[in-house]
Image: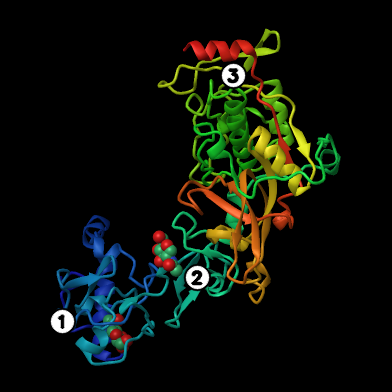
């Protein structure tokens, strides 16, 4: 009694009457066997149990497999295989069963006939062939190989757009654009979502406590000013918020750090912790999903924060994937308006958990001169601004929002609210002979971005609303602080 799946020299052809009889006999013999024999007989090999390549969704990628390996085996030969994508395919006659695991070129090369399955077209990229379903990323878009042999790519506007970089650099806009690896692969929508993070204060706050400054109409201010020159060693480096939409906390910590350093005359130069604000200033604030600067200033005044060294930034790489880290640091009053931390620093290396506070923040008028005067007398100020698509690609020069995306589809033009630290101003002679006035401001996208983390932006024209809501603050520095820190 031959096994049912005999190593037949020739496949059965059920159309031939002789072969039909053979098959019938085999079936009857099978039915007449005692059950235990049957189970022994039909104990099947892994190959037989495995679904055919087509059933596993693997599509023929075309190309030569049996041919390249000169493999064509008669009958059943489980060793008659060649590599195929990330698995193997067969070049023996047994592969030609209902669920085929034949190599794509088996029929044509070994049998000399048309394949029973339509051979899928392949997609080509950089001279390589890819099967249907293969993918690659083109900047922020995923491209997939379709069965028709064409790549099909998503159509998102990317944060870095080579066309826009070129258009800015070809145009005479007064600033230059470039590619940033930290933005490469992100969509514009993601950039607006994860790289900004300041909520516009409501009108009630916008209209509130504007500082009246006594400025003489003809008061002359210098043409150039940089806080880093006047208060050397007290102006802190631009921060890096990563993909945390928490510029409300970063710009507030940045301005407060500089101001406390200046107002203590350099006796203390704390780099305050944005994370302390992100994690603990949670009333009406959304941490890395945005927040308001007036809320941050309220917290700095009433609760205070520790240094960044004590409470370091916890980068969240996958945005929104993790819950926000809980608050690890509270403060309690020690009388006379001073506060102390209730916990150790949330990292083993730092022991100084001193709390720093500010006085109430005040809003400046939108007058260019008043902002300049405040900056020059008291230190860097905080400004809210609208960030447009081209700003992400800023490299150097005096930024002005350009119309380079005007001819692109609407989803290429996006803007969102951000906050930054203004540290100075200046004027530059343009090639056309006019003087171009600018602000110097620190962003929070790391020191690789822009001019070492800073950017310059047109001054006196409320460019991107940067002069609309400007805030100053006093560090809360008592004489005993000065003394205390002086002694150290
Ligand atoms: C093998 O493939 C050929 C071509 O599709 C087909 O005619 C034939 O019936 C197949 N044989 C078996 C045993 O499946
Ligand atoms: C931009 O930078 C990324 C990452 O560094 C690089 O892969 C890409 O090719 C660059 N794109 C352009 C248009 O220069």
Count residues near mark 2 (Cα–Cα under 10 Å), then give few for <14, some for 14-19, many for 20+: some
Count residues near mark 3 (Cα–Cα under 10 Å), then give few for <14, some for 14-19, many for 20+: many
Secondary structure under badge 3? loop
Instruction: Give left or right: position of 61 versus 442.
Output: left
Which residue is at the front of the view, 84 or 48?
84
Count residues near mark 1 (Cα–Cα under 10 Å), then give few for <14, some for 14-19, many for 20+: some
Tell me what residue is drawn at x 63 percent, y 68 percent.
Answer: 412
Q: Is residue 132 visible?
A: yes
Disc 1 to disc 2, C-alpha distance: 50 Å
Can you say whether 381 is above or below 177 in the image? Answer: above
Quadrant in which the N terminus appears: bottom left
Residue that label 3 marks: 355
Disc 2 to disc 3, C-alpha distance: 46 Å
Please tell me which of labels 2 and 3 falls first in the chain. Answer: 2
Residue that label 1 marks: 72
Please tell me which of labels 1 and 2 falls first in the chain. Answer: 1
Can you say whether 72 is above or below 315 in the image? Answer: below
Residue 39: which quarter of the image? Answer: bottom left
| The residue carrying mark 1 has its beta carbon less than 8 Å from ligand 1 | no
Disc 3 to disc 1, C-alpha distance: 79 Å
Secondary structure under badge 1? loop
Instruction: Give left or right: position of 456 versus 310.
Output: right
Residue that label 2 marks: 162
């Amino acid at each position: 009694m031959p096994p049912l799946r005999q190593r037949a020299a020739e496949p059965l052809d059920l159309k031939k009457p002789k072969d039909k009889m053979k098959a019938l006999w085999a079936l009857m013999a099978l039915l007449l066997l005692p059950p235990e024999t049957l189970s022994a007989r039909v104990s099947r090999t892994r190959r037989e149990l495995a679904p055919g390549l087509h059933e596993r969704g693997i599509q023929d990628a075309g190309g030569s497999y049996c041919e390249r390996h000169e493999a064509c085996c008669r009958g059943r030969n489980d060793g008659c295989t060649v590599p195929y994508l990330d698995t193997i395919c067969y070049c023996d006659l047994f592969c030609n069963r209902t669920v085929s695991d034949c190599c794509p070129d088996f029929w044509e090369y070994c049998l000399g006939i048309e394949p029973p399955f339509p051979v899928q077209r392949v997609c080509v990229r950089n001279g390589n062939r890819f099967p249907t379903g293969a993918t690659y990323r083109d900047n922020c878009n995923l491209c997939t190989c379709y069965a028709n042999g064409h790549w099909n790519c998503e159509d998102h506007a990317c944060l870095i757009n080579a066309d826009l970089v070129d258009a800015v650099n070809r145009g005479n806009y007064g600033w230059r654009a470039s590619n940033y690896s930290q933005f490469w692969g992100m969509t514009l929508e993601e950039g607006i979502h994860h790289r900004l993070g300041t909520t516009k204060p409501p009108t009630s706050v916008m209209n509130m406590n504007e500082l009246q400054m006594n400025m003489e109409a003809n008061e002359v201010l210098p043409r150039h000013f940089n806080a880093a020159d006047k208060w050397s060693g007290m102006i802190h480096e631009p921060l890096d918020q990563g993909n945390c939409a928490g510029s409300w906390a970063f710009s507030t910590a940045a301005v407060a750090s500089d101001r406390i350093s200046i107002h203590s005359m350099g006796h203390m130069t704390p780099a305050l912790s944005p994370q302390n604000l992100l994690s603990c200033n949670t009333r009406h604030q959304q941490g890395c999903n945005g927040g308001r600067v007036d809320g941050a200033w309220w917290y700095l005044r009433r609760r205070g924060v520790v240094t960044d060294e004590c409470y370091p930034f916890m980068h969240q790489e996958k945005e929104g994937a993790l819950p926000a880290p809980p608050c690890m640091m509270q403060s309690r009053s020690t009388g006379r308006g001073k506060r102390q931390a209730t916990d150790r620093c949330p990292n083993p290396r730092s022991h100084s958990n001193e709390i720093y506070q500010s006085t109430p923040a005040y809003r400046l008028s939108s007058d260019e001169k008043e902002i300049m005067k405040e900056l020059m007398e008291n230190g860097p100020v905080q400004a809210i601004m609208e960030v447009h698509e081209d700003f992400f690609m800023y490299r150097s020069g005096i930024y002005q929002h350009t119309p380079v995306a005007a001819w692109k589809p609407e989803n290429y033009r996006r803007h969102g609210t951000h906050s930054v630290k203004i540290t100075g101003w200046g004027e530059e002679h343009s090639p056309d002979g006019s003087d171009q006035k600018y602000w110097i401001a620190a962003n929070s996208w790391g020191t690789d971005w822009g001019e070492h983390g800073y950017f310059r932006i047109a001054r006196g024209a409320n460019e991107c609303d940067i002069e609309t809501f400007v805030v100053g603050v006093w560090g809360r520095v008592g004489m005993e602080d000065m003394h205390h820190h002086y002694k150290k």
